[in-house]
Amino acid sequence: MTKITYLLGAGSSYNACPIWNLQAKAMVSLGQQELTKHYIENISKNNPPTDWLSKEAQKYITTDKQKILKEILHFGKKAQEFNTIDTYARKLFLQEKNKELELLKMSVSVFFDLWENYNKQLNFYPRSNSSDKSDKSWDKIDQRYIALFSIFLEKKNENLLLNDDINFITWNYDLQLESTYNLFANDSSDPDFNLIDAVFPFLEKSNTNLNNKVFHLNGHRGFALSRSEKPMVLRNNETIENYWKLHEKLYSNLKTGTQTFNHHIKYGWEHNIESEWFKQIGMILKQSDILIIIGYSFPLFNRKIDQFLFSHLHPNKIKEIVYQDPYSDEEKILNLFKYPDRYKNKIKLLKEVDQFHIPHSHFIDLPKATPFIIR
């Protein structure tokens, strides 16, 4: 069977999540909207602060919820200044500003929790605000994931499992892949991601018995780690009110060190590429017949990790490298190889992004059905 690996960038979630500068704008919009709403509902209907980051406004920010929203606003502004939140995170990492970096990680995780679960309720960044001027609303799950999983999921021993020959490596914080699996496997709109990990493994683990189907290179939303190193799922319990109630001490716990986001939002350049986790990623790429890159721009600060990934593509094994992106460029890929001529004729560029690419060879490799003979 053909072994297929998908490498996903922000553009793969374009229809469901704001990407790049839109993420920064949405973070700012969320912080301003919700802090102003709290002020009007609880303090005064008149003259709410126009700058929630000003010294004067801080006397109105007293609860953990408000403090988290202020941090989301703050880091949204920094993302606008530095073009992306990842770039600003890189700055903090290089300056060893670890406490601020962890606040950033908390803000990113909570922002995507709120976005993927409550955006329709909060409506803090309508799609019409984005540069494409689309009248289409944001998808809860990008429909392209749903179409892809309808092909790749299989029923085995009463479990719904991803085809053995399919793997995902993603730079995205979102849980679009995991939520898509839940859509097919369960009826619950409040997925328990720990249970999902048992059959659709995506959490980073330190042991040698890794069986991940998804590898999040920058980590992902939805989890924090307690002092006892027990993962805590940030549950999305139906309403935004319940979400905040369940996590009412999140900011305080982060400050006291009883909870941390450092394990679950973990940038590629923070990883030890000698770890078992990265060795498993390397093995998957080494065994890949086809690599499909979707919506990834190859930013320079990820270059070290990207070179690691592409160094594991065996020139005699890899048959095709598909780059699916409106701005796909062969040179971005060739520049990652030590010997680019070995791969040049294997690269295929796709500008059309309405559906995720599925190689024709996957359908050729499918077991043939027993012919039905009419007698």
Image (cartoon, rainbow, N blue to C red):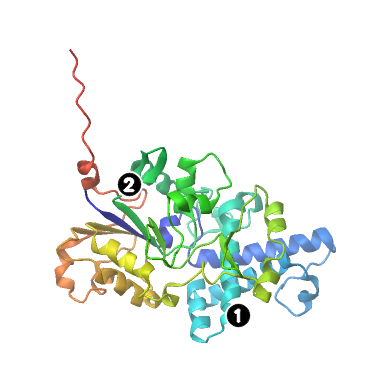
Q: Give me the residue at 52% from left, 77% from top.
A: 88
Image spot of residue 173 (x, y percent): 49, 63
Which residue is labeled 1 in the image? 99
Separation (CA) of disc 1 from disc 2:
41 Å
Image spot of residue 272 (x, y percent): 40, 76
The amino acid marked with disc number 2 is Asn
Q: Tell me if label 1 and label 2 are in contact, CB under 8 Å.
A: no
Q: In this view, does 213 lie to the left or right of 138?
A: left
Image spot of residue 79 (x, y percent): 54, 73
Image spot of residue 288 (x, y percent): 24, 59
Which residue is labeled 2 in the image? 163
State how many labels appear. 2
- Residue 319 vs 206, above or below: the answer is above
Crowd around label 1: few <14 · some 14–19 · many ≥20 (10 Å): few
Q: In this view, does 340 lie to the left or right of 179?
A: left
- The residue lying toward the viewer, choosing from 168 and 303, is 168
